[in-house]
Image: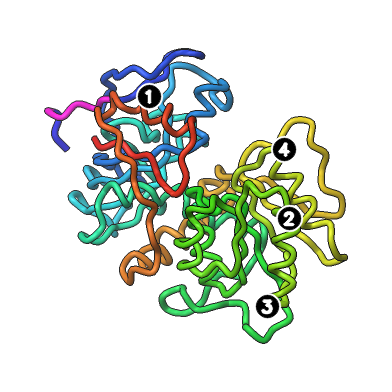
Amino acid sequence: MSAQTPNLAAVLKAPGEKMTVEERKIPSPGPNQVVIRNHAIAMNPIDWKRQAWNVLIPTYPVVLGSDVSGEIAKVGANVTLLKPGDRVLGYAFSFLTQNDDEAAFQTYTVVESHRVTKIPDSISFNAAATLPQGVGAAALTLFDVLALPLPTGPRFSDASIAADSAASKNALLIWGASSSVGFQTVQMARKIGITVFAAAGEKHHGILKSLGVAGIVDYKSKTAAEEILKLAQDAGKQITYVLDAITTAETVETVREVLSKGQRTRKFAYLMFWPEGVEPIQGVWAEHVPGEDMGDRRDDLARWLFKEALPAWLEDGSIQMLPQQVVEGGLGGVQNALDILQKGVSLQKVVVEI
């Protein structure tokens, strides 16, 4: 790691302000950490919401962001499976630790080594940066909140739900399947063998069907709930599980309509903040997808995902990455990238090259 390369960062100095680029000290890793020299960083909805709404930021100034890819610059004393120069992606967790050294929007980022995955030479840094938060939230949704079984087999791609079992009649609805988390949840869900139905913009139906979605509706349809129930009925399935990756008052009400039918146990995972003024869905077990738990309570799941499953999927090409909208300007382009994301993108990840 060369001291000649400064650690520039996009810093949010106070509520209501725009990002400014400043130089920070190049961080050092703890015993079980690595320092990544970032080559690409990706934006997530929580990033612009924290800035625009002044939420989940206890103190200023602050550096935001969680999705990075680049090269290992330095490893901690206990790290043996990674070395300087390795091409990697990493899931940074300043959101949990409140340590700006562990934030993404800078040249160098400290990441716990078990949330770092080596990437093949065939995968670009831009593409790799689209993955960390998306796959992390997908895994938490399926294997923690919804308590579905992990995929089996040496490549973690063999269905854990037998096609002829009673559980095979249960289906998963993903509302917002063209979002980053929705897109990765579709792929991970198909690996365990559960039938997936989805709601997304009509122009994205083709690619989602190619990933194995059994049936899909236009999220703008006024009869979306009715259409989803009909698709499930025709397939001999029942919507037992739901991920709402958008979580607005309108999407929750549609989910309420879908889950109101039948007496089965139903589970509802929602990704964003619960909409103000919206009543709970009676008789449905609902839980927010706790992204911070990937760095705390479900540390075991993070190790499985980033050190076992994701490397296998990247190696055999069984996981797709979202197309990237690359914003120019390096770290000086982070504010523009967040503004673009706030205006709305679908089936794309907004990425900044460093």
Earlier residue among tags 3 and 2: 3
Inter-mark Cα distance, 3 to 4: 30 Å
Earlier residue among tags 1 and 3: 3
- Residue type (three-letter) at the residue carrying disc 3: Ser
Residue drawn at (24%, 27%) of the image: 329
Q: Which mark is residue 215?
A: none
- Residue type (three-letter) at the residue carrying disc 4: Ala
- Residue type (three-letter) at the residue carrying disc 1: Gln
Inter-mark Cα distance, 1 to 3: 45 Å
Residue drawn at (40%, 28%) of the image: 100
Earlier residue among tags 3 and 4: 3
Q: What crowding class fits label 4: few (fewer than 14 Cα within 10 Å), some (14-19), or many (20 or more)? A: some
Residue 63 occupies quadrant: top left
Q: Which residue is mark 1?
A: 335
SS category of the residue bearing label 3: helix
- Residue type (three-letter) at the residue carrying disc 2: Ala
Quarter occupied by the N terminus: top left
| Residue nearest the viewer, comparing 250 with 88 | 250
Inter-mark Cα distance, 4 to 1: 28 Å
